[in-house]
Image: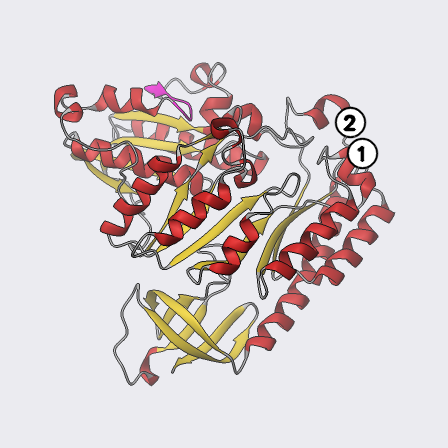
């Protein structure tokens, strides 16, 4: 057990990761050594940043808490704290269930956790550490920038508004200050995230401000790539599209969750958009930002989904040919509209079969997309060296979730560096990943 060492364990999405990095920075200022996601935790204090989005994520979080509670029982750990989405959602129930935890904190009160652990409150206050400063746990050349928290959409199946509350935008200047600070730390690639970037600015400025924010981010010297995640199709800010087309350092990439394609299902899901409106939006995005990579997420097995709905979904996926697509089977979340008003009437085995069928279609489409890139020269940023390969990504590939480009190290005639950009000729592919050579 290492004294004054804190193990930070982050579960869930990149939005959670940003929170964990902020906590780490401030604890380090307060005198601690923080280790993130250690293979073998050795600190005398552990903080678990939990996810509570869907059943599998909740189970993973609970299992990790129980595992660390066992370490505490064996006296391999002195203090255990839990923060994040799971504890935000079940703050009343969890303390009685797992008494080994020394403190439960939600998603928005981690300042109280920091103050509780701080060696000196005066030292922390006098550090001059801005609220947005953080210890970067990703490879130093890329990071995530969270521009808002919460969601006002209240889709039938989704517990996020119950956990995060109403949509709250961060002030533009604060975000831009953060971007400038991150550039000073060596960051080149900025993945913009929120539960709903489409609504950015509506609460603070009474108008859409995403286009203006991204336009100004793109003007910051040192920003090489900006990539946009988690747009919502309803009330989409169309003024963003010319901004994306204008700036070379805004990746021609958008992650926009669509969930389904029939009026019947979009209505049951409370998406507040019709199938025709959704298709028109996709057509407009592709027209105004030529060559854009579209990533989406779809759901199968939502209450009321008929065989006809699912067949229409499969046909639509084949027609749209999304560059990247994820999908998941509906799971009932207590407190949501679907849990309160619908019967979970699609059998589990049908959900899984539909999920498999849909992903098989996407695998075939993804292989075709990869084959189209063979022979092309693409700009690639190098993330790491692994085995016999340097591994990087194109502007069409977000970290962790998308494809990678593998470059055989023994064939290199030039020394290449992590975090630098290179022109790579694509020579082949395997599954979704590409193989290439430095030009």
Name the residue: 73% across, 58% down: 317
* Residues shaded magenta: 102-108
- Whether 104 is among the magenta residues is yes
Which residue corresponds to mark 2?
342
- What is the number of the mark on residue 208? none
Quadrant of the snapshot with the C terminus:
bottom left
CB within 8 Å, label 1 to label 2: yes
Residue 176 seen by the camera: yes
Image location of residue 262, percent across then percent down: 80, 45
Residue 305 seen by the camera: no
- Residue 119 shown left or right of residue 336 in the figure: left
Q: Secondary structure at mark 1?
A: loop
Between label 1 and label 2, give the one nearer the viewer.
2
Name the residue: 19% across, 24% down: 118
Which one is in front, 280 or 195? Answer: 280
Image location of residue 276, percent across then percent down: 79, 48
Q: Is residue 392 above or below residue 172?
A: below
Which residue corresponds to mark 1?
345
Gap in Å between the C-alphas at discs 1 and 2? Answer: 8 Å
Name the residue: 72% across, 32% down: 270
Label 2 neighbour load within 10 Å: few <14, some 14-19, many 20+: some
Q: Secondary structure at mark 2?
A: loop
């Amino acid at each position: 057990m290492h004294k004054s060492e804190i193990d930070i364990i982050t579960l869930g999405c990149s939005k959670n990761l940003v929170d964990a990095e902020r906590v780490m920075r401030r604890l380090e200022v307060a005198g601690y050594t923080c280790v993130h996601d250690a293979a073998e935790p050795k600190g005398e204090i552990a903080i678990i940043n939990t996810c509570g989005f869907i059943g599998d994520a909740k189970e993973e979080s609970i299992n990790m808490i129980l595992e660390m509670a066992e370490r505490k029982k064996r006296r391999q750990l002195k203090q255990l704290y839990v923060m994040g989405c799971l504890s935000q959602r079940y703050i009343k129930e969890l303390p009685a269930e797992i008494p080994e935890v020394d403190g439960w904190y939600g998603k928005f009160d981690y300042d109280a956790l920091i103050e509780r652990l701080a060696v000196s409150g005066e030292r922390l206050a006098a550090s001059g550490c801005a609220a947005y400063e953080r210890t970067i746990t990703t490879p130093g050349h890329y990071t995530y920038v969270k521009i808002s928290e919460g969601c006002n959409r209240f889709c039938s199946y989704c517990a996020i508004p119950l956990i995060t509350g109403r949509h709250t935008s961060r002030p533009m200047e604060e975000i831009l200050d953060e971007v400038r600070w991150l550039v000073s730390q060596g960051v080149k690639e900025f993945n913009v995230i929120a539960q709903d970037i489409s609504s950015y600015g509506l609460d603070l400025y009474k108008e859409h401000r995403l286009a203006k924010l991204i336009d100004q981010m793109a003007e910051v010297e040192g920003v090489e790539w900006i990539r946009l995640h988690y747009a919502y199709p309803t009330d989409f800010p169309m003024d963003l599209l010319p901004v994306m087309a204008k700036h070379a350092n805004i990746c021609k990439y958008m992650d926009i969750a669509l969930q389904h394609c029939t009026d019947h299902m979009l209505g049951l899901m409370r998406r507040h958009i019709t199938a025709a409106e959704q298709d028109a939006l996709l057509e407009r995005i592709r027209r105004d930002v030529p060559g854009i990579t579209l990533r989406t997420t779809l759901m199968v097995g939502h209450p009321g989904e008929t065989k006809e709905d699912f067949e229409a979904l499969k046909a639509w996926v084949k027609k749209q040919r999304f560059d990247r697509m994820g999908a998941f089977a509906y799971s009932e979340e207590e407190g949501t509209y679907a849990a309160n008003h619908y019967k979970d009437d699609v059998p589990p085995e049908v959900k899984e079969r539909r999920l498999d069928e849909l992903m098989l279609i996407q695998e075939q489409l993804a292989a075709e997309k990869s084959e189209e890139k063979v022979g092309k020269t693409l700009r690639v940023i190098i993330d790491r060296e692994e085995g016999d390969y340097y591994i990087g990504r194109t502007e069409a590939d977000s970290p962790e979730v998308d494809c990678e480009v593998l470059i055989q190290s023994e064939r290199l005639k030039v020394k290449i560096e992590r975090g630098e950009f290179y022109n790579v000729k694509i020579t082949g592919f395997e599954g979704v990943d590409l193989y290439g050579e430095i030009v």
